[in-house]
Amino acid sequence: MPMLAELEGLKVYFYDQGDKRFIRACEDIKFSIKEGTVLGVVGESGCGKTVAALSMMGLIDGEPGVIEGRFFFKPKQKDRRSVMLAVMRGSRKDRDFRRGELFDLFNGLKRCVEYDQYPYTIIKDSERWLRKNNRIMEHVRGKNISMIFQDPSRSLNPFVPVGIQIEKTIKWLSKNEKKGQLESEVAELLREVRIFNPKVVMNMYPDALSLGMAQRVVIAIALVSRPKLLIADEPTTGLDTTNKYRIIELLQQAMEKHDMSLLFISHNIGIVGSIADDIAVMYAGIIVEFGSKQQIIIAKRGPKHPYTEALVSSVPTDADIKKGKKLKVIQGIVPNNKMEVVGCPFLPRCPYAVGKIRRKCRERCPEAFEVTPGHSIRCWLYAN
């Protein structure tokens, strides 16, 4: 399948004024998304999943924020020229801003960042970085890439009826829509997300909606632009089991209808396994394993990162539920991301880190080793 997006070497730091320390949100994040497929990103809360997604959207506003990385993306045909010109502006000497039909949306941003090692300091021209980022993302954000956030109530204005909020989004994309056409399009969008009384819901305020219905409205708004990539950040949080799988089914149908790809973020590897084609497992700001669903979840044998293995084993089977077995837990806690982690961040919780392997794990964090084609694991157990 053709490639839609490639994220490479993403590095996102924040600064804690109280502790006078940098917070490592993301470190060397790398994954790819093929056209028409679902990439699931899974990991515990605070591992950097949402930060990586917000970076792709150009929505990180904390300091210093994104300080390194490349994000190649294939925009719609009609937006290709405007994206290319925005990417090239002010950095025409950079010849590697393009890979076929994919453009580096982070191109030229590295010029705004410098490092000082002693003491470790990040010097960022944030104003210049933001201007460059916004020039590029105005052709991408909301048009080629849309995002569904975890809490739908925060995405909707509580003082404006649902129908008007969707209409405003349509007007932003299509300037010449007439009132009758707008209402018809809004109703059609609501029906598409399985709201079967659209006329009633259009006149309702967000506070009158259930959580599941509010999430459907947010999905409808995200689909207005017919994006190439839809990012869903924990879209099933707070929903009961029935509604969780209804939302997943809804996203799958939207993908097929609009020929788009999906980046699905969740802490629940069982939910991710029900929808994803490929899976990236994150831990403490890094991707510890990347591969297909078959390699990560379905295969009972074969290489797995110890953290992935623990996540998969913590999902109860039907037999476990019937027998009343206790859920398996991962012993220990996630390391403090304000501290410098010299070795493997999973070391204190890893049951396989013994002997020579443990000494390696203490010395430095391993690179990602490709154990089979398309399947990489960041663990010394699989070093060549």
Image: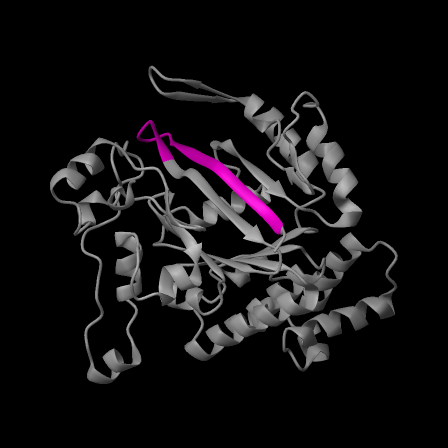
| Total marks in image | 0
Residue 362: x and y, percent?
Answer: 19, 35
Q: Is residue 59 magenta?
A: no
| Residue under the image location 79 percent in, 56 percent down | 171
Residue 18 shows up from this direction:
yes
Out of 36 and 339, give the one closest to the viewer: 36
Q: Specify whether 135 is left or right of 28.
A: right
- Residue 298 in percent (x, y) is at 37, 67
Rendering coords of residue 82 (x, y %): 77, 39
Please name whichever residue, 323 or 55, is drawn nearer the observer in this view of the structure: 323
Q: Is residue 210 visible?
A: no
Residue placed most toward the observer, 278 or 251: 278
Residue closest to the far bottom = 322
Which is the main secondary structure of the residues drawn in magenta?
strand
Indicate the quadrant where residue 208 lies.
bottom right
Residue range highlighted in magenta: 3-23
Is residue 12 found inside the magenta-colored segment of the image? yes
Q: Residue at x 36, y 53 (%)?
A: 45
Quick check: 344 left or right of 197?
Answer: left
Up/down of 180 relative to 115, above or below: below
Q: Residue at x 21, y 62 (%)?
A: 329
- Check the picture and name the quadrant holding the C terminus: top left
Q: Is residue 28 above or below residue 111?
A: below
Nearest to the observer: residue 235 or residue 228: 228
Query: Which x, y percent locates residue 297?
Result: 37, 64
